[in-house]
């Protein structure tokens, strides 16, 4: 079969430049022509060797072209019926001929869509049997290395034709000014207040919000450390996990094989609401292209909230962070805390390795890393290099690790997190809701954007993390 569902034909919607040109419209018209459709079907099933000239299929997603042709043909047939009904009559001879012709086209396109889906299912099963590919997106499971949230969204709904290059800046500017001129594509893709977002609200198109989430991923320390994104297709998602490694035992010849199983349970991610306010100058919005500014502001607001929730989430109306997790080892530097040394970082890594876990990073306040970086040799006063034991463990800093925690009589302490952050799952629901706060910051000439987001964060394996508390300057 010439049409490979795992490498479907991309005709424009996933390729915004091609979507705008005539080849897309020409291809859809050709797929509604019975003769050309028959030639295309023969090309697909291998009985024909030539692709019709007017069907210009780039390397991408053929199902979208078929679906678009199916929908357009159906609308044309519906228009015939509607016109006859409005005039109080049956279809005339010419209309009946067009209707029957269209019905044949619908049946043929439907057969091609079914054929593609069956082939895709077969390839998915074969891929699963052979271990799968890193490009395969599995619903409600962590993204693999190299995968993006946008890719997961596209895989979830392969027939979503929303362009990927919609301008968030145009959406925000139009929402604030009420002027959607020059933003026709954005207006067509956005669900505004009348469809459930509430007064002044906008539901960002799924592909737009997914790209913002991918940008926020790059700014989030726990994700940089290895935490895994789990796209949530439902409000509650259950992800299986190992809680104990399976053990094997040596045996004598002819002796019974001991049954020692690894233990499994599940991590439950339940979507919770996260809100952040982003303030932008009114003049900036009205007079400039704010695309990068708005994306950066929203992504940064999400990133700091994700970091804090992943590390310190209290578990009440918010995710349960690493420190709050009862199964995570916490070690204090003393009743009132103490100044850290490299030994404390070494011991944190060692405690994980003693549990057969390999840390992917250590996360701390920048103050802590500065303190360690200032350690000098006693004789030469030269800065000491970090111990080689820590050379494979990245050290990351974030201002979401406080430096004013109270331990004993000290109120200036901080924490040091060591972990295999791949065992931290971050569930993400799509379509952040953006609402304009037009009055709240009016006296300062600013506009507030209230961003709502839904997701969850949970520790998959508590013994993969270690927290040192009482870290003083």
Image (cartoon, rainbow, N blue to C red):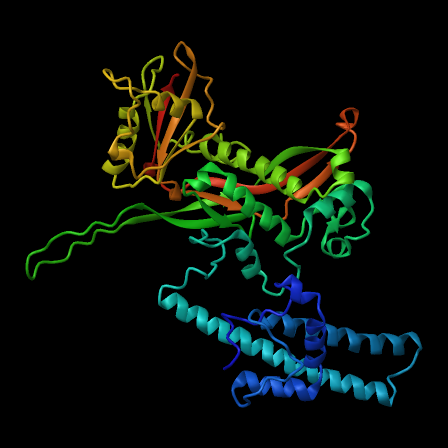
Quarter of the figure with residue 466:
top left
Coordinates of residue 159 in the picture (x, y in percent): 62, 65
Q: Position of residue 270 (x, y in %)?
A: 52, 43
Outermost residue toward the left? 253
* Residue 329 coordinates in the image, percent (x, y): 32, 30
- In x, y percent, where is residue 179? 83, 47
Does residue 416 lie above or below 193 as drawn?
Answer: above
The C terminus - image quarter? top left
Across the whole image, how many numbered discs are drawn on residues? 0
- Locate residue 66 relative to residue 118 in the image: left or right: right
Left or right: residue 393 compared with residue 51: left
The residue at the point 88 percent across, 76 percent down is 83
225 relative to 98 in the view: left or right: left
User: Above or below — where is 297 with respect to 444?
Assistant: below
**For the view shown, which residue lies furthest in the right direction?**
87
Q: Is residue 235 above or below residue 35?
A: above
Residue at the location (18% across, 52% down)? Answer: 248
Which residue ends up furthest to the front in the rendered image? 380
User: Is 266 or 363 nearer to us in this picture?
Assistant: 363
Q: Is residue 33 visible?
A: yes
Residue nearer the viewer, 224 or 133: 224
* Residue in front for this viewpoint, 185 or 153: 185
Above or below residue 256? Residue 38 is: below
């Amino acid at each position: 079969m010439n049409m490979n569902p795992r490498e479907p034909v991309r005709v424009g919607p996933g390729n915004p430049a091609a979507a705008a040109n005539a080849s897309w419209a020409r291809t859809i018209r050709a797929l509604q022509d019975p003769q050309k459709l028959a030639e295309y079907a023969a090309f697909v099933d291998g009985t024909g060797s030539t692709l019709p000239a007017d069907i210009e299929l780039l390397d991408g997603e053929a199902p979208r072209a078929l679906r678009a042709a199916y929908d357009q043909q159906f609308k044309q047939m519906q228009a015939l019926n509607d016109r006859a009904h409005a005039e109080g009559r049956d279809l005339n001879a010419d209309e009946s001929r067009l209707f029957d012709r269209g019905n044949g086209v619908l049946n043929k396109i439907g057969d091609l869509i079914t054929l593609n889906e069956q082939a895709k299912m077969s390839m998915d099963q074969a891929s699963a049997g052979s271990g799968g590919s890193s490009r395969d997106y599995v619903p409600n499971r962590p993204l693999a290395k190299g995968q993006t949230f946008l890719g997961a969204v596209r895989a979830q709904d392969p027939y979503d034709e929303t362009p990927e290059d919609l301008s968030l800046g145009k959406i925000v500017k139009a929402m604030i000014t009420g002027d959607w001129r020059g933003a026709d594509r954005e207006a067509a893709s956005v669900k505004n207040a009348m469809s459930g977002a509430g007064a002044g609200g906008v539901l960002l198109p799924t592909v737009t919000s997914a790209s913002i989430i991918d940008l926020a991923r790059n700014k989030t320390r726990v994700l940089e450390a290895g935490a895994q994104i789990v796209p949530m297709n439902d409000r509650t998602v259950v992800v299986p996990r190992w809680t104990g490694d399976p053990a094997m035992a040596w045996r004598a010849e002819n002796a019974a094989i001991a049954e020692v199983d690894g233990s499994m349970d599940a991590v439950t991610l339940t979507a919770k609401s996260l809100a952040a306010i982003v303030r932008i100058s009114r003049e900036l919005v009205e007079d400039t292209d704010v695309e990068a500014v708005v994306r950066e502001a929203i992504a940064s607001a999400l990133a700091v909230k994700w970091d804090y929730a992943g590390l310190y989430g209290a578990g009440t109306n918010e995710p349960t962070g690493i420190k709050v997790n009862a199964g995570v080892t916490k070690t204090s530097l003393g009743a009132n805390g103490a100044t850290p040394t490299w030994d404390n970082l070494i011991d944190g890594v060692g405690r994980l390795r003693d549990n057969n876990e390999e840390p992917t990073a250590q996360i701390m306040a920048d103050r802590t890393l500065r303190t360690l970086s200032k350690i000098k040799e006693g004789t030469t006063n030269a800065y000491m290099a970090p111990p080689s034991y820590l050379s494979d463990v990245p050290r990351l800093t974030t201002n979401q690790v406080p430096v004013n925690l109270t331990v004993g009589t000290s109120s200036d302490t901080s924490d040091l997190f060591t972990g295999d952050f791949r065992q931290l799952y971050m569930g993400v629901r799509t379509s952040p809701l953006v609402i304009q706060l037009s009055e709240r910051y009016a006296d300062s000439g600013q506009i507030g954007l209230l961003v709502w987001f839904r997701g969850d964060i949970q520790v998959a394996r508590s013994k993969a993390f270690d927290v040192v508390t009482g870290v003083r300057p």
